Image: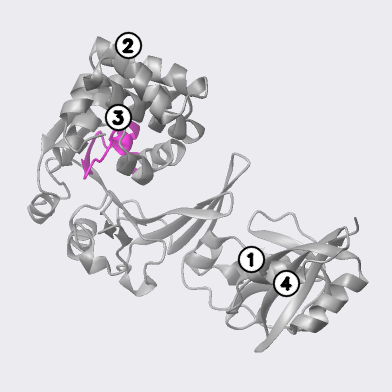
Amino acid sequence: MPDDAGPVALLRTPEGTAATARAAALLAEGADVLAGVARLRAEVGPELAGPAWELARLRARARPVFGADADRLFLTADTLEQAGRPELAARRAARLLADGTDSAADLGCAAGTDTVALARAGARVLAVDRDPVARELTAANAAALGVDDDVWVVAGDVVDLVDAARGGEVAGCGAAVLDPARRGGGRRLLDPDRWSPPWSTVATLLDRVPRAVVKVAPGLDHDRVPEGVEAEWVSVRGSVVEALLWGRGVSEVWRRATVVRDGAVHELTADADPGTADTGPVRGWLHEPDPAVIRSGLVSLVAAELGATLVDPTIAYLTSDAATGSPWVTSYRVDAVLPFHLKRLRVLLRTRGVGRVVVKKRGSAIEPETLARQLRGPGSGTATVVVTRVAGTPTALVCAINPG
């Protein structure tokens, strides 16, 4: 979709709605882009064909995450990539407004997914962005999802608004969501001072507006987290999808790891740094902590819960004598432990009839895909091979061997 607001406005018309529906039907029939756009040009005209096809394609991509809302959303490729999961946006909004606060600012509204979540949670929302495309998308999505009576979309500079924040409010609102842009030139910006808005604005918002939440990079240095601000890492199906800093008016703990598995939400919290877990020899089971647990620095709490120890003081793998159904880890039965040596490892696997392996690594320079090919053999069995350090020594753990 071109980088101007025109196509968004055009697609909101009855003609645009019909064209997008037709594009969605062609996609469902399996039409490729050349054939699909050609048919659309003939049926709805060249002005609508390209934008309608692109929107239908983006809605199809959004459907697994956004469900029924996807077929009403207005998106660009960039805003779809940046958009968070609606169930997590709803969770953030509910927590932010839990004290009865009824007004919120979405600072840098992008496609408006946080704006919609805040409005659905009962807030009057001021959606702010410098980008006219973002403002048009947010207005369109608020209307499409039926919350536009509670949403005001305005042009504004987030840095200026935060600098002007007073009395616990920003832009006249009692709560705020900020999601700084963390990419530039197609690359991730690792330095928070280069985010847009930069870290100084993040720190000012958290200092001046107690009921604020800021989305940050999952790899944020813990030393950056201001005193009294809760840092939370959230994972879905084993991948960290967001990291959040909660302002002092919302903060409840020092750190929080939130794991979403099979529709259930599990939370692990600490009021202070719990320190590191003890180290011990590899036992019958290996446990890989969820990335949210690792990022939040709460591995030692899981170790205590499982009666487990670290295999190495610098590696986030735990080991214990028993299996576990804990949501905080993925567990593997350990069938063999040997110093990492390609030839010895290949011999062991072939002796046990293993022909296909999944390779995992932590604290090793090996390439898992390359090693998996090197270990492939004639056997019909499967196994997971974990390459890591154990007490400082490069080690291979052969786990969960399943005969063919």
Q: CA distance from mark 3 to mark 2?
A: 38 Å
> What type is the residue that disc 4 sits on?
Gln
Q: Nearer the viewer, residue 12 or 221?
A: 12
Frontmost of labels 3 and 2 is 2
Q: Nearer the viewer, mark 2 or mark 4?
A: 2
Question: Going from the N terminus, do you reach mark 3 or mark 2 first?
Answer: 2
Query: For the residue marked with disc 2, what is the amino acid?
Result: Glu
Nearest the viewer among 278 and 30 is: 30
- The residue to which callout 2 is attached is 43
Q: Residue at x 26, y 34 (%)?
A: 1
Q: Which residue is mark 1?
A: 369
Q: In screen coordinates, is 26 left or right of 355?
A: left
Q: Where's residue 232, x and y in %? A: 43, 57
Alpha carbons under labels 3 and 1: distance apart: 46 Å
Give the extent of the magenta segment.
96-119
- Give the left or right position of residue 69, taking residue 128 as reference: right
